[in-house]
Amino acid sequence: MAAPEAVFQARFGTAGRRFSAPGRVNLIGEHVDYNDGVVLPMAIDRRMHVWASPCGGRRLSVVAYDFGEEAELDLDVPVRRTGTWRDYIAGVAFHLEQAGFPLYGACLLVAGDVPAGAGLSSSAALEVAVGFALLTLAGHKVDLLALACAGQAAEHDFVGTRCGLMDQFVVAHARAGQAVRLDCRAKRFDLVPVDTRQCAVVVADTGIRHRLAASAYNTRRQECEQALAILRRQRPTLLSLRDVRPDELDVATTELDPGLARRVRHVVTEIARVEAFVQALVSGDWTRAGALLTASHRSLKEDYEVSCPELDALVAAAQSVPGCYGARMTGGGFGGCTVSLVAPDALETFLHVVPPAYEWATGRVPQLWVVMPSDGVGETTSE
């Protein structure tokens, strides 16, 4: 198959402009973004690319290069929830216009190497890259927060996943060499250096694909809302589960049934782990950082119940390698990927040992990537 830029040229008769946005791995802080928590994702060096040119009118002509499909989308009559990749594009365009950014017709080709369904935010990368392209073609100065919010709204209204803002935010705002410490309540962030010369970040894909809109993801969010409503009977000033302090957990959870108590315990302890993890990164304490990853996975498995046997097997395979500081599932759960911190001198062994160990346990062959913290969305002006 011809290269994406050649296909765009042949299909639309112009070279177009090239935009891209990265996937992301969440180092720690899982399922707390929609509870107003603090998270620590980083963009990775796998990206979704969009070639784009203005076409006039109010229609988007889109080629989905990786699927070998095309679609015509009407900006004036957006169709919700087709259950296809079209929903992400139609949704982000609709919500950008709702936010006050008029758009125009465009020719688009999307292609990328962020694995779909692996928990690496391929959907957020698509939304943010397409939104950035459409805003730029329409002559708008790009408001990265508004762009991220439009992507989140697209997930809610057009896809059916009630996600938090974390994925779209980091895909928009990330910087090379840094993780993004995001306060999801204040929508403020700061950058935390990640020195991959001192510790490698390895993402491993279980090969189990999830569909968050059809999974327990939305149920978990509803459970958090239910728990908050119960806790507010005694503490009406609670704004979110973030406001429950760790030292209040034992008292607070006595008001809840055991399932809801476990959900709250995960949220509260995970937010505390994020802050401890940031301090470990700053001080270069990789042993402490790894222990926090491992504790996060245990909480996600036992308290939040979003892991699966394959994720657990892949974490166990990683932890069996000397020099692996820690590992956990990352992303929404029920499949997808793990993230591990590995000492550089143990990396070769890790990459050699983990795949057969996981295959022996599950019968599946994982994919592993050593990832680098990368820049967020932007336009590629030269090769």
Image (tube, helix red, strand yellow):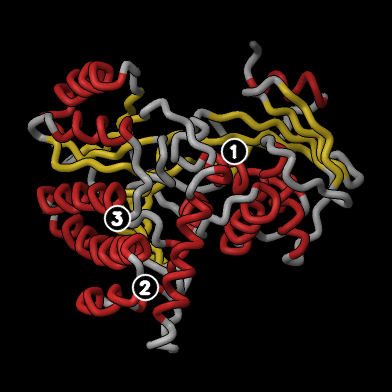
Secondary structure of residue under mark 1 = loop
What's the residue at 65%, 32% (across, down)?
A: 110
Q: Which residue is mark 1?
A: 381
For badge 1, the amino acid type reads Thr
Q: Which residue is mark 2?
A: 242
Query: Residue 322: x percent and y percent?
Result: 7, 32
Q: Residue furthest top?
A: 1
How far apart are the alpha carbons under marks 1 and 2? 42 Å
Is 250 on the left-hand or right-hand side of 64?
Answer: left
Query: Residue 357: x percent and y percent?
Result: 20, 20
For badge 2, the amino acid type reads Arg
Q: Quadrant of residue 145?
A: bottom right
**Foreground mark, 3 or 1?**
3
Query: Residue 169: x percent and y percent?
Result: 50, 57
Would residue 129 be seen by someone viewing this image from the given angle?
yes
Mark 3 or mark 1, earlier in chain: 3
Query: Residue 134: x percent and y percent?
Result: 73, 48
